[in-house]
């Protein structure tokens, strides 16, 4: 499907705006959480403001992806955007934590729809050769939101009040909605097919249980609940795979994994979630403890990482569209990313901070070099009527990898530090401020402990990227096509969209 240059520019502007708003709502809340929880009198339930959003956005990915293929991405996108704006209004007007969490769940569900359909719509309106450039632009929304979100959230909370953290979405979202109504084209979906309701239900239950389990796994008081949740997740996923092998229109088409391009692309997407997204949350604490920096200074390392990701995500998308070649980027990216993380494992405690900052900037550049590119490549390997499904699958694998690896790394750090701490320090009350107020000997001990604990974590992440090298080499070589793929021919509905 070809659009005029003006309509394409308006479309990309709209999709970039709403993708940024969706990503921003995942990061902007962080600095306002304590204020929100205090005003609503529910500090003990504060984490659910984030967990509810993440949980909803994760579990709905394959369902929304399949719906996009069945009824068209335009309807799913516009509906998701309207729900997102309504949920943003509701978040700001919440009178207690229950109302806020419910509104955040609705926000997360709709954010998954607008981000997923943004990628799907680009796949429908561009050639495979053009696609990396535009997906790189839209993909820049996520690292940009990481860079801007916490600072913006703090400023808004301090000067306007926390409801505006959510209400700031409204003017920009309405402008993007106006552009989208005009610019997002109607995509013919061809023959109407059955929706995999049984697969959607079992997958949702299994994913909810898995996300809850990894959320609880680090809390000793919730150990039993975590075990029960893991058990339910295992049973749910087993049932889901049986269903997906048997139904005609699965929400996650397992048969597509036999395609080498798809299998390699999905593996590379998982590497990003497991190998980098998982560790960025722990970098500030690591540098405060091991390098004895302030909270402000410790934030420079993840900022450098994400900035590197942002630059290369846009740059390699432009290069791939210009040359038509794509395989070289994930090969170089995974190789140098593995080297960078291996270097982090070897750095001695006390190294000047600019050294790990430069190394992690390089890891970010390497990761961004194939972050959006693999989405474009995998989209080109499936029929057009399965674009939404495969786009959802590749995003889901990345998000699941990040969620599970984040919980595992948190557990490793918690157990490792607690087992080595000097007797006069209690792990449950250990803070950077407490350490800095201790003697030089204690500070040196804690710094070395964190260095010893994080070294194998970085080594494991380097090995993860090494696996990514294999996936990148197995990615079939080729050039991206300049031709638009034909739209499927619409046929009369033969079956209702029900299971």
Image (cartoon, grey):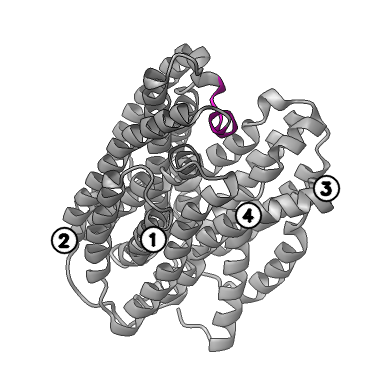
- What is the C-alpha distance between the residues marked 3 and 1? 36 Å
- Between 390 and 142, the residue placed more toward the observer is 142
- Decide which of tag 3 and tag 2 comes sooner along the chain: 3
Foreground disc of the pair 4, 2: 4
x 17%, y 65%: residue: 476
- What is the C-alpha distance between the residues marked 4 and 1? 23 Å
In magenta stretch: residue 34: no
x 71%, y 35%: residue: 34
User: Residue 456, how many percent across, how many down?
Assistant: 28, 36
Against 443, is 483 above or below? below
Task: Name the residue carrying label 4.
Answer: 149
Quadrant of the snapshot with the C terminus: top left
Task: Name the residue carrying label 3.
Answer: 161
- What is the C-alpha distance between the residues marked 3 and 2? 51 Å
- What is the C-alpha distance between the residues marked 4 and 2? 36 Å
Against 420, is 333 above or below? below
Task: Name the residue carrying label 2.
Answer: 473
* Span colored in magenta: 429-436
- What is the C-alpha distance between the residues marked 4 and 3? 15 Å
Mark 4 and mark 2 residues within 8 Å of each other at the beta carbon: no
User: Residue 188, how many percent across, how many down?
Assistant: 48, 68
Foreground disc of the pair 4, 1: 1
- Decide which of tag 4 and tag 3 comes sooner along the chain: 4
């Amino acid at each position: 499907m070809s659009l005029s240059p003006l309509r394409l520019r308006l479309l990309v502007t709209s999709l970039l705006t709403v993708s940024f708003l969706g990503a921003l709502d995942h990061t902007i809340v962080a600095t306002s959480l304590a204020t929100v929880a205090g005003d609503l009198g529910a500090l003990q339930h504060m984490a659910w403001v984030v967990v509810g959003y993440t949980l909803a956005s994760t579990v709905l990915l394959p369902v929304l992806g399949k719906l996009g293929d069945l009824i068209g991405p335009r309807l799913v996108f516009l509906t998701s955007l309207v729900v997102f704006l309504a949920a943003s209004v509701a978040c700001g007007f919440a009178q207690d934590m229950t109302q806020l969490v419910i509104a955040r769940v609705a926000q997360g569900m709709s954010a998954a729809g607008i981000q997923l359909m943004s990628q799907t719509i680009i796949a429908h309106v561009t050639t495979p050769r053009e696609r990396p450039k535009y997906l790189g632009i839209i993909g820049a929304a996520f690292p940009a939101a990481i860079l801007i979100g916490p600072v913006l959230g703090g400023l808004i909370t301090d000067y306007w009040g926390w409801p505006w953290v959510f209400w700031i979405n409204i003017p920009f979202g309405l402008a993007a909605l106006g552009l989208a109504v005009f610019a997002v084209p109607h995509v013919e979906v061809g023959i109407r097919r059955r929706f995999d309701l049984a697969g959607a239900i079992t997958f949702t239950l299994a994913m909810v249980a898995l996300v809850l389990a990894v959320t609880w796994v680090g809390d000793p008081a919730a150990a039993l609940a975590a075990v029960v949740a893991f058990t339910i997740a295992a049973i749910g996923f087993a049932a889901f795979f049986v269903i997906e092998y048997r139904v005609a229109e699965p929400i996650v088409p397992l048969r597509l994994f036999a395609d080498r391009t798809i299998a390699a692309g999905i593996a590379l997407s998982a590497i990003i979630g497991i190998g980098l997204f998982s560790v960025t949350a722990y970098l500030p604490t690591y540098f405060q403890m091991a390098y004895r920096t302030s909270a402000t200074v410790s934030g420079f390392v993840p900022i450098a990482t994400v900035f590197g990701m942002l630059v290369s995500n846009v740059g390699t998308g432009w290069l791939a569209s210009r040359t038509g070649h794509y395989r070289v980027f994930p090969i170089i990216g995974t190789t140098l990313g593995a080297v960078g993380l291996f270097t982090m494992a070897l750095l001695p405690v006390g190294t000047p901070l600019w050294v790990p900052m430069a190394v992690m900037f390089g890891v970010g550049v390497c990761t961004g070099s194939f972050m959006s590119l693999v989405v474009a490549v995998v989209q080109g390997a499936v029929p057009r009527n399965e674009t939404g499904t495969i786009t959802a699958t590749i995003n889901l694998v990345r998000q699941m990898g990040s969620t599970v690896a984040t919980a595992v790394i948190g557990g490793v750090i918690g157990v490792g530090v607690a087992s080595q701490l000097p007797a006069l320090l209690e792990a449950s009350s250990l803070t950077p401020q407490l350490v800095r107020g201790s003697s030089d000997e204690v500070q040196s001990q804690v710094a070395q402990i964190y260095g010893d604990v994080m070294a194998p974590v970085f080594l494991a992440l380097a090995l993860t990227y090494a696996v990514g090298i294999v996936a990148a080499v197995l990615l079939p070589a080729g050039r991206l096509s300049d031709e638009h793929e034909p739209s499927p021919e619409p046929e009369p509905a033969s079956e209702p969209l029900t299971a």
